[in-house]
Amino acid sequence: MTAHAVATLKMKDPAALAAYREKASAALARHGGAILQASTELLRLEGDQALPDGVAILTFPDRGAAQAWIDDPDLIETHALRTKGAETLIALL
């Protein structure tokens, strides 16, 4: 069953995040994943929590593929660019 993840980002290092973006699609594709939608232009509809600087919705063939993507030892450097570039929260739905 298709699985989705929501990633929220608070920018720390724009250059590192830009380097991550160059590798993100290929890294996701290794496990059948893709970016379904991403935006830095968020509009608050409800609530008073601080909005993140960006949000991405990821899609994977199943939950196992999502877990394999985040645990892939060949992607350690790629994931490190993301976490250097932004404080992130990735939640698997």
Image (cartoon, grey):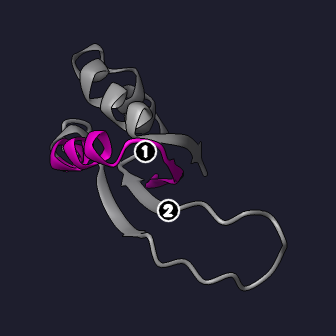
Q: Position of residue 70 (x, y in %)?
A: 41, 29
Is disc 1 surrounded by few (<14), some (14 to 19) or many (20+) residues within 10 Å? Answer: some
Q: Secondary structure at mark 2?
A: strand
**In the image, what residue occupies the spot 46% across and 52% down?**
1
User: What amino acid type should be assigned to the residue bearing mark 1?
Assistant: Asp
Please identify, in this view, whether the residue under mark 2 or under mark 1 is nearer the observer: 2
Of the two numbered discs 2 and 1 on the same chain, state the one appearing first in sequence. Answer: 2
Q: Relative to 89, is 36 above or below? A: below
Name the residue tied to disc 2: 55
Q: Relative to 23, is 78 above or below? A: above
Q: Position of residue 84 (x, y in %)?
A: 40, 31
Judged left or right of residue 79, residue 31 is left
Is disc 2 surrounded by few (<14), some (14 to 19) or many (20+) residues within 10 Å? Answer: many
**In the image, what residue occupies the spot 22% across and 38% down?**
27
Q: Position of residue 53 (x, y in %)?
A: 52, 62
**In the image, what residue occupies the spot 48% across and 62% down?**
54
**In the image, what residue occupies the spot 41% across and 56% down?**
58
- Numbered badge on residue 62: 1
Q: Secondary structure at mark 1?
A: loop
**Residue sticking out furthest to the top:** 73
Q: Position of residue 44 (x, y in %)?
A: 69, 81
Q: Relative to 25, is 66 above or below? A: above
Q: Nearer the viewer, residue 15 or 49?
A: 15
User: What amino acid type should be assigned to the residue bearing mark 2?
Assistant: Val
Q: Count of labels shown?
A: 2
Q: Nearer the viewer, residue 47 or 17?
A: 17
- Residue numbers of the magenta segment: 1-25
